[in-house]
Image (tube, rainbow, N blue to C red):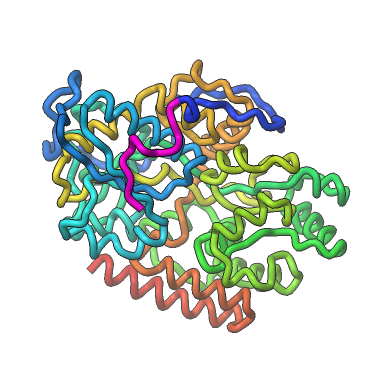
């Protein structure tokens, strides 16, 4: 679907709305400047590729059109904020934004085939990590924007660890080298819960792993499946990874994500993940048909009030605030682990085939402005450069506070599909086999070991 920004249904007035749902677990707002992740940065680059003409004046775009792709929901925090950024961009530059709605899977599966053609957009949202942005960067499909980053000062607005997923070396390994994208929000995975169903069944918010198991057993005993789930896309793989993280430390994450040491899939971390996931399926904690369900299926089922809990990311938060009106809900950190899937948000990247890179940089600059960052924060996002005084939505404070707690404890462990191109599909298909009981945990671990080792070897060599 292609449409001019000026024809989008959401206007600026809608974008600035503050949700009025009943507020849960309101907490004091922490300063947005506290979004400091564990330092993982690398050497600065002197490359000046992608520098803009001026920090003070927006480039003239009169008569120009830029094509922009992203896959955020219209009423999610990022969709709201970026819609407003498009409006400001058109007003200030005179250019037109042709916004093309894309699905996450659509961009993930086709980016490397499209970005070297004349169908490539001028700017797009893209998943971060070695197997995603790193791969495209190493293939020469993304513009080295180091010069633009330095000229606009984006490097000074982002902590070292937020920079980790924006910078890649010649092999496409994150954490050092040139800048190939800019994140303007953070994200992490947590448990969303339906307070009404918890109250109905006398379940307290779990504080320990044993509490979580007890809570799920209570729901199963009442013929209620505890967890909404999607096995056809990322959620099941992220739960599998979280289960591994309950047994892991930072060195395991560095080995798995940054290749510091070989990863043994028969080690205690991943063996626990496979065995426990299979046990959870047998115990009825996840829907028996979830192997074929998409993330959207999972999310809408939670919105409908069908499940007590959903384990997924902060990208759902704004949408839940906007769409859930039949019950009270809240969030809690997955108990029993100090590490959780999470990182900076996805990146704004500029394909090397972009016909208007200077205008693309100006759009990125607008998304980093305080008013756009405040929109993210006040609509359920986790801004990286907001003025704390602009963040006034109490419900959003709940999310930002939890992120800060995990962040300050060095608890963000990236995502399970990042290590190698294609490993997303390998992980999804393997966990689907656990859901369907088509393979034993040991068989799944052997499959994943082979896929991981082969993928990492191919990626590095």
116 horizontally vs 2: left or right: left
- At horizontal 35% and vertical 31% (from top left) the residue drawn is 85
How many dots with numbers?
Answer: 0
Most foreground residue, 49 or 379:
379
Camera-side residue: 396 or 96? 96
Q: Is residue 171 left or right of residue 237?
A: left
- For residue 216, which quarter of the picture? bottom right
Quarter of the image holding residue 116? bottom left
Front residue of this view, candidates 96 and 41 = 96
Query: For this view, does 76 lie left or right of residue 113?
Result: right
Please state the horizontal and vertical placement of residue 146, each as a whole percent of the image. 19, 38
Image spot of residue 381 (x, y percent): 50, 36
Vertical relation: 190 (above or below) 367: below
- The percent position of residue 15, horizontal first and vertical second, equals 47, 30
Residue 114 falls inside the magenta stretch? no
Residue 65 position by quadrant: top left
Highlighted range, magenta: 1-12
For residue 456, above or below residue 346? below
Give the residue displayed 57% in from the left and 80% down from the top.
442
Q: Tell me the quadrant of the picture where the C terminus can be found.
A: bottom left
Percent from the top left, x then y, of residue 430? 52, 75
Is any part of residue 128 visible from this angle? no
- Residue drawn at point x = 65 percent, y = 28 percent: 20
Whether residue 296 appears in this view of the structure is yes
Query: Would you say 119 lies left or right of 453 here?
Result: left
């Amino acid at each position: 679907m292609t449409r001019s920004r000026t024809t989008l249904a959401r206007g600026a007035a809608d974008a600035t709305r503050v949700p009025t749902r009943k507020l849960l677990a309101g907490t004091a707002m922490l300063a947005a400047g506290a979004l400091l992740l564990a330092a993982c940065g690398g050497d600065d680059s002197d490359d000046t590729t992608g520098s803009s003409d001026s920090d003070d004046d927006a480039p003239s775009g009169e008569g120009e059109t830029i094509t922009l792709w992203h896959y955020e929901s219209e009423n999610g925090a990022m969709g709201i904020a970026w819609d407003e950024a498009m409006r400001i961009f058109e007003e200030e530059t005179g250019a037109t934004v042709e916004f093309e709605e894309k699905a996450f899977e659509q961009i993930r599966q086709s980016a490397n085939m499209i970005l070297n053609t004349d169908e490539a957009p001028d700017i797009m949202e893209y998943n971060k990590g070695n197997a995603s942005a790193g791969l495209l960067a190493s293939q020469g499909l993304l513009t080295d924007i180091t010069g633009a980053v330095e000229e606009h000062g984006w490097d000074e607005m982002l902590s070292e660890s937020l920079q980790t997923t924006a910078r890649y070396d010649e092999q496409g390994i994150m954490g050092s080298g040139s800048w190939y994208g800019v994140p303007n929000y953070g994200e992490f995975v947590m448990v969303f819960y339906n307070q009404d169903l918890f109250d109905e069944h006398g379940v307290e918010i779990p504080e320990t792993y044993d509490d979580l198991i007890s809570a799920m057993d209570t729901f199963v005993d009442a013929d209620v499946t505890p967890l909404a789930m999607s096995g056809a896309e990322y959620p099941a793989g992220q739960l599998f990874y979280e289960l591994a993280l309950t047994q892991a430390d930072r060195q395991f994450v560095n080995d798995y994500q940054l290749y510091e040491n070989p990863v043994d899939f028969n080690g205690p971390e991943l063996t626990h993940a496979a065995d426990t996931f299979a046990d959870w399926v047998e115990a009825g904690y996840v829907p028996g048909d979830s192997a074929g369900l998409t993330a959207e299926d999972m999310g809408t089922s939670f919105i409908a009030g069908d499940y007590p809990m959903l384990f997924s990311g902060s990208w759902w938060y704004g949408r839940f605030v906007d769409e859930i009106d039949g019950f009270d809900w809240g969030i809690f950190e997955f108990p029993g682990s100090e590490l959780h899937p999470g990182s900076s948000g996805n990146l704004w990247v500029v394909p090397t085939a972009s016909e208007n890179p200077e205008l693309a940089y100006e759009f990125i600059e607008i998304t980093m402005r305080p008013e756009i960052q405040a929109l993210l924060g006040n609509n359920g996002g986790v801004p990286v450069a907001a003025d704390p005084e602009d963040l006034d939505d109490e419900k959003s404070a709940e999310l930002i506070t939890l992120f800060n707690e995990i962040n300050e404890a060095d608890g963000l462990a990236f995502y399970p599909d990042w290590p190698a191109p294609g490993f997303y599909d390998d992980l999804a298909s393997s966990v689907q086999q656990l859901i369907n009981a088509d393979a034993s945990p040991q068989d799944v671990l052997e499959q994943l070991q082979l896929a991981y080792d082969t993928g990492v070897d191919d990626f590095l060599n």
